Image (cartoon, helix red, strand yellow):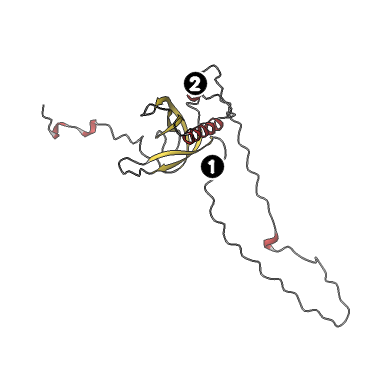
Amino acid sequence: MTVFIDDVELGNLADVDDSFATLPAGEYILQSIATELKDTKDGTGKFISVQYEVVSGEYAGRKIFESFNIQNNKQQTVDIAMKQIKQWVKALGGTGDERLTMALMRGMEGKEFRAYVVVKPDKTGRYNDQNHINKFSPASGVPIPRPATAPAAKTSPPPRTTAPVNNVGPKVPAKGPTSAALPWEIKTMGPIPPQAAPQSQVPAHHDDVPF
C-alpha cells in the first residue's frame, strides 16, 4: 500500500529519544538500573554489562553503559575491571572485601553514587562517542576534585629598609612594638571541611556462586 506524505500527522509521533545520547564530561549522580552477565563475542570470556541512569540535574534520565570484563585472555583487562567494581562497591558503603557474585552486582541497583564521567571518542569514525565512568565516589561525599592546575608564580616581598644608624650620642630605645607582621607573613587557617555522612553497608552474598 502506498502511503502519501499528507497521510502522516507528525503531531502523533513521539519525539526522538535522546536518553542514549553522549553526556558532556563532568560529575553526575548515577544509579545502576540493569545488570547482566554476558559472553564475549569470541566465546572465550565473560563480562558484566551494566546500565546506569542519571538521577538528578539537567540530564536526569540519561543513560550510560559500562562493561566489566571479568574473564578475559588479558589479565590486565580483568584487573582493571575488578578495581572498578571494587571502587563502586566502596562508594556504596561496602568494604571492598565482598565476594563478587551476580547477586552482589544486582544488589547495587537503585543505590546512588557520585561519578566522574568522561567522553571516549570513537577513533574509527563509524560510531558515536561513548561515555565512560572514570571514578566512583559516595553520593553524599565531597565533590570529586578536578585535575590540579599549575600554581600561580609567587612574588617576592619587597625588601625591608632601615634608617641609618646615628653613632653620635646615646641610643634611645624605640617605643612601641619592636616589629610588626607584614601582610604576607600573617597566616590564616580556613574552615575545616565537613565530614562525609556514613554510607549504608552493601550486604555480602556468601550464598551465591562466584564467577
Q: State the mark number for residue 144.
A: 1
Residue at 50 percent across and 18 percent down: it is 209
Q: Considering only order in the chain, which callout, 2 or 1, is on the residue closer to the N terminus?
A: 2
Q: Where the N terminus falls, by quadrant?
A: top left
Q: Amino acid at mark 1?
A: Ile
Residue at 67 percent across and 62 percent down: it is 184
Q: Is residue 58 visible?
A: no
- Residue at the far left: name it: 2
Q: Amino acid at mark 2?
A: Ala
Mark 1–mark 2 CB contact (< 8 Å)? no
Q: State the mark number for residue 48.
A: none
For label 1, the SS is loop
For label 2, the SS is helix
Q: Is residue 125 above or below residue 61?
A: below
Query: How far across and how far down the image is residue 93, in percent?
Result: 57, 29
Q: Nearer the viewer, residue 12 or 196?
A: 196
Q: Is residue 94 left or right of residue 5?
A: right
Query: How far across and how far down the image is residue 128, in percent?
Result: 33, 40
Q: Is residue 10 visible?
A: yes
Identify the residue position indicated by label 2 in the image.
Answer: 103
Q: Would you call the spot at circle 1 few (<14 residues within 10 Å), some (14-19), or many (20 or more)? A: some
Q: Is residue 42 left or right of residue 203?
A: left
